[in-house]
Amino acid sequence: MAKHIGPQHGWPEEYVQRYQQAGYWRGETFGTMLRERALEHPQRIAVAGNKQRLSYEQLDRDASTIGAGLLAGGFNAGDRIVVHLPNIPEFVSVIFGMFRVGIVPVYALPAHRITEIEHFVNSSGARAYLCAAEHGGFDYCSLADTLKERCPDLEQVFVIGESSGRHTSLQALMDGAADTQLPATAAAPQDIAFLQISGGTTGLSKLIPRTHDDYIYTLRESARICGLDADSVMLCALPMAHNFPMSSPGFLGTLYAGGRVVLSPTPTPQDCFELIASEKVTQCSLVPPLLMLWLDAAERSKPDLSTLRVMQVGGAKLSAAVARRVKPIFGVTLQQVFGMAEGLVNYTRLDDDQDTIMETQGRPISPDDEILILDDNGVPVPPGQAGHLLTRGPYTIRGYYNNPGANQRSFEDGYYRTGDIVKLTPAGYLVVQGRAGDHINRAGEKISAEEVENYLLSHPGVFDAAVVSVPDPYLGERSCAFIIPKNEKPRAIELKKWVREQGIAEFKVPDQIVFVDTFSETAVGKISRKTLRAQLRAQLEQTQHNS
Ligand code: AMP
Ligand code: DBH
C-alpha cells in the first residue's frame, strides 16, 4: 500500500488561479489559523466538554505537543491516521496536532465498527489508528486488537483513556513531547488536510480529500453567513466527525470565528438543554429527526433556551411543517443547510423572508459554485424544473482519493454528480426533491443499498436481496430489505443479527425485512438493480397506501 498522499488535489491550474484571485483561497492552513487565534485571544475558551475547558492558547500548545509526539514517533507529513473519536475535546487537539505537522486524519464516526475501520485503514493506507478506549458502552480497544490482526501494515494504535497497556496512550505520546514548540504549520495551503468519509452510494464509503485552502474558505464564509463571531457559543450535538457539525458552520467554523465550542456527549434533549442553559449556547446544528425530538421535548419541559439565536438544520430534507414550529418554540432563526462532504454547501440566509427559509434548502456559499440541473439525458432542464444536480467550484472536490472507478462514475468535466434531484427557484435557491442514487438517508446517516445487500447475500439462507428506502415519519427514511430465501427461509431477526455481526455501524442494519418469492415476474436478471429497487419501493408504498 502506497504511503504517499498521491495527487494533491484535482483542480486544474486555471481554476487554482481563479480561486486565488477571487480571494477564496487565501493561503491559510489549519496550523496558522489556530496560532493566529491563540495570539489574538489566548485566554478565551476554545473548547469545552467532558469536564474540560481548553483555552485557545492551551489548544495551540496541545496541538504542538501532539504533532511533535507523532514526529518523534516516526510519523511524517503526508502519513494518514484513522481518527475514531466521540465528542471530546481531544478530538480537536488531535486533529490540530496532525494538521500542524501535515499528518492527514481520516475521520471515522463513533458508530463505525471493524468492517468500516478496516476499510478506512486499507483504502487510505493509514499507518495508525487512534480511538477512545470506551464510548457509549463499546470497547474500542478490542476493535483495535482485531484491526491489528487484520491489517498487518498498521503500525500503531493510539488510545485516549485507559488502554490496559496493549496500546500506546495519547497521554504517553504527549508526555514524551511536552513543551515542544512547533512552527504554526508544516503543511502548505493546497495540501490535503484530511480525508472525509462519503455517505457511500455504492458499497463502502469513499475517501474525500479536502485541502486547507478550500475547506478554510468554507469556514470563513460559513461563519459569516451563519452570523458567528468571537462571542458565539456553538453546541456540537451531532457526532463531530460528520461534515455538517464539523464545518457548516460547525465546530471548525466557530473556531475560525474565535468563538467557543461546547461538546455534548449525546444529542438528546436532556443533555443538550442543560448545556445550552449552563454554557449560554447561541447556535446549534441538528438533523431533522433530532429537531423533532427537541421540539417535542421543549414543548413539554419548557427549558431555558434564551441564549439560542440560530439553529442550522440539514443532512436530510426538513418538512416545511416542522420548519414552521422552530421559531415559535425555540425563539430562534432557522437556517436550512443542504450540504455534502464532497463540497457544495447551501444555506438559507438569516435575513431571508420566512417562505424562503421554510420552503427551500438555501443557496450556495460561493458566487463561483457552478450548478447544473440536468434531465436523464444530460440536457439542462427548463428553469424551475427538477433534475439531477451537478456542481463544481472552489471547494467541491474534483475526485475521490485513489478511486478511479468511482471518479469515472461520479465526475464529469470537473463536475461532481451529487445524486440529488433538485429544483432551482427564480432567486437561485435549491429545493431538494429526492435522490437518483440508491442510498438510504436514515436520519441524516447515508446507507449504501449495495453495501447492505452484500452483507445479506453472504448469508447461506439468502438467494437474493434488494435494499430500498421507505418513508418514515420520524427518521425521514428507513431501510427495508426484500429477501428471496433459499430452500430454508431464515428468520428476520436472524438476518438482522447476521448483518450486525459483519461488524458494521448499527444504523446500517435493515429496519424491516420482507420475504418474497421473486422480485419481478419478467424482470429478474434483465433489469438493473436500480430499476429493481425502484419497483420494490413503489410496490411497498402501494401496499402501505392500501392498508
Ligand atoms: P454525504 O455525501 O454523505 O456528505 O451526504 C450528502 C447528502 O445528504 C446530499 O447529497 C443529500 O442527499 C443529503 N442532504 C444533505 N443535506 C440535505 C438537506 N438539507 N435536505 C435534503 N438532503 C440533504
Ligand atoms: O449531509 C451532509 O453530509 C451535510 C449536510 C449539511 C454536509 O456534509 C454539510 C452540511 O456540510
Image (cartoon, grey):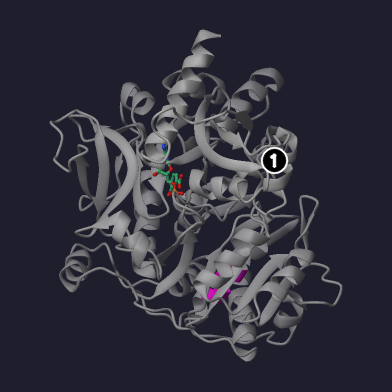
Q: Is residue 265 visible?
A: no
Q: Measuring 61% from the left and 70% from the top, which residue is drawn there?
A: 94
Q: Is residue 96 magenta?
A: yes
Decide if residue 432 is in sight here: yes
Q: Is residue 469 above or below residue 188?
A: above
In this view, 149 is above or below 365: below
Q: Quadrant of residue 292?
A: top right
Q: Nearer the viewer, residue 306 or 404?
A: 404
Q: Nearest the camera: 382 or 18?
A: 382
Q: Residue 154's x, y, as percent?
A: 64, 79
Image location (x, y in percent) of residue 123: 51, 70
The stretch in magenta equals 94-98
**Residue 169 location (% of width, % of height):** 76, 76
442 is higher (above) or lower (below) than 16? above
The amino acid marked with disc number 1 is: Leu
Helix, strand or loop: magenta stretch: helix
Residue lying farthest to the top in this orientation: 546
Q: Which residue is mark 1?
A: 495
- Image location (x, y in percent) of residue 174: 70, 80
Q: Is residue 50 left or right of residue 19?
A: right
Left or right: residue 155 versus residue 391 is right
Tell me the residue at 38%/61% (across/down).
215
**What number of labels is visible?**
1
**Residue for point 60% across, 59% down:** 116
